Amino acid sequence: MKLLYSHSNSLFVYNIKNILENNGIECRLKNDLMSSAAGEAPPTETWPEIWVVRERDYDTAEKLIDESINGDPSATSWFCSKCSETNPPAFELCWQCNSERSSA
């Protein structure tokens, strides 16, 4: 096993774990109940951690995390055909007029 990800916010950690598992990467959660020891141990030692079970999955897991945090670098903005507004790649509806992306 290899440590992949740790964060002070357990919601981020659980979200990353779900993303990995949905992509077929086996992982384990550690320190998820350590927050109560935060005064006794260094703070970063109590953060929840995700460990990848198979080291061969590590690079793929890193890429998935990067894409989930920073977005897909190959994605491009799109223009709405109704109002000509530029929309970020993650948007499925135009933020200006609420038209669907497929009609853009």
Image (tube, rainbow, N blue to C red):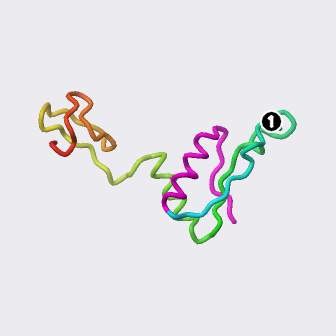
Instruction: Name the residue tied to disc 1.
Output: 36
Q: Position of residue 104 (x, y in %)?
A: 16, 42
Residue 38, image x, y percentages: 80, 36
Q: Residue at 21% across / 39% down in the picture?
A: 100
Quarter that holds the N terminus: bottom right
Q: 55 left or right of 91?
A: right
Q: Which residues are magenta?
A: 1-23
The one nearer the camera, 84 or 53, is: 53
- For mark 1, does the 10 Å Cα neighbourhood hold few (<14), some (14 to 19), or many (20 or more) residues? few
Magenta region includes residue 17: yes
Determine which quarter of the picture holds residue 51. bottom right
Q: Position of residue 77 (x, y in %)?
A: 26, 43
Kind of residue indicated by mark 1: Ser
Looking at the picture, does residue 90 appear above or below residue 57? above
Q: At which x and y percent is residue 36?
A: 80, 36
SS under mark 1: helix
Task: Please give the name of the residue rendered at 60% of the width and 63% of the height, measured from the top-left corner.
Answer: 26
Judged left or right of residue 101, residue 71 is: right
Look at the image and say whether residue 41 sits in the magenta stretch: no
Q: Residue furthest bottom?
A: 56
Q: Where is residue 83, by image quadrant?
A: top left
